[in-house]
Amino acid sequence: MSIATIDVQPRVEGVEFSGHSLSIRLHDGRMISAPLSWYPRLQAATPQEQGDWEILQDSDDRDIIHWERLDEFIPVIALLTGTPSRESKRSFELWLKGRKTNMQ
């Protein structure tokens, strides 16, 4: 038995934040939304920081959304499969503590 696969990489056209959601607009017209709570660093970010994103590609040419100032990477494939951030609570708390120290 063979399995058909489609080798099309979804491309990011835009990133939007509204209320408690992160929404990604793809070039093919789809919108993918996820709870902002899945990405604590984005949830803790200012609107200016949230808007400062870029698109990178991994070694398989798949789009990854990157927020440099937040050190946050979200692969589009993770959004498509419903996979939230895998950052540990301890890691996030250390990042948040360092962020608060640097903002004072």
Image (cartoon, rainbow, N blue to C red):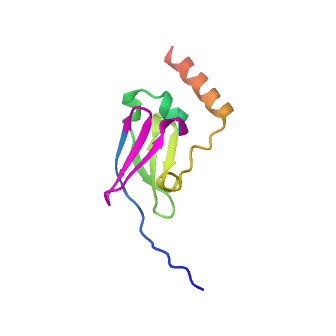
If the image is split into quadrants, where does the N terminus sit? bottom right
- Residue 101 shown left or right of residue 9 in the figure: right
Instruction: Give the total number of marks visible in the rendering.
Output: 0
- Residue 55 shown left or right of residue 96 in the figure: left
Looking at the image, is 15 positioned above or below residue 2?
above
- Foreground residue among 13 and 35: 35
- Foreground residue among 20 and 60: 20
Give the x, y percent position of residue 90: 68, 31
Give the x, y percent position of residue 65: 44, 47
Residue visible at 50% across and 64% down?
60
Give the x, y percent position of residue 68: 46, 38
Residue visible at 42% across and 64% down?
9
- The region drawn magenta spans 17-38
Q: Quadrant of residue 26?
A: bottom left
Q: Is residue 76 magenta?
A: no
Residue visible at 43% across and 38% down?
21
Q: Residue furthest top?
A: 104
Looking at the image, is 36 positioned above or below residue 9?
above
Residue visible at 36% across and 29% down?
48
Q: Quadrant of residue 87?
A: top right
Q: Is residue 24 magenta?
A: yes
Q: Residue furthest right?
A: 90
